[in-house]
Amino acid sequence: MHETALVKNLIHKLQNICAEEKAGRVVEVSVWLGALCHMSPDHFTEHFVQEAADTCAEHARLRIEASADIHDPNAQDVLLQSLELETDDEGLP
């Protein structure tokens, strides 16, 4: 269940950022997976798709960097590196 908690935490952060920025949706998310977070990129993607359903992050493109460094201080974490948002007023003159 550690994996689910990490992804739920990330989705919660994304929802807060969308609200703060008045964004309609997350277009792209770049994340870093620590070597000890117990998730491969495919496993992370499965959890992300499930947890992002019906949120501003649904259908977001994922860019995933997986670390192999077990000595990194964030080796047990999933870190948000960057994201691209679509604001509600994009495309308006």
Image (tube, helix red, strand yellow):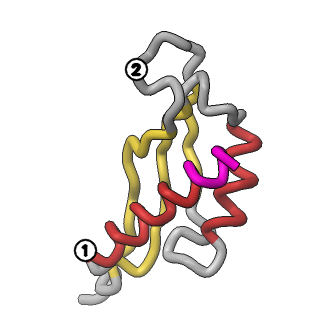
Q: Residue 62: where, in percent of width, then height?
A: 58, 50
Q: Residue 93: where, in percent of width, then height?
A: 24, 89
Dominant SS of magenta comes to helix
Q: Name the amino acid, label 2.
A: Pro
Q: Name the amino acid, label 1.
A: Glu
Dot 2 surroundings within 10 Å: few (below 14), some, or many (20 or more)? Answer: few
- Between disc 2 and disc 1, the foreground one is 2
Q: Residue 12: where, in percent of width, then height?
A: 45, 65
* Residue where numbered disc 1 is placed: 20
| Left or right side of 72 for 54 | right
Residue drawn at (64%, 66%) of the image = 51
Q: Is tag 2's residue or tag 1's residue first in the polypeptide sequence? A: 1
Exactly how many numbered labels are in the figure?
2
* Residue where numbered disc 2 is placed: 73
Residue 16 image-quadrant placement: bottom left
SS under mark 2: loop
| Left or right side of 82 for 78 | right
Q: Residue 86: where, in percent of width, then height?
A: 39, 72
Residue furthest out toward the front: 1
What range of the chain is rendered magenta?
Answer: 1-6
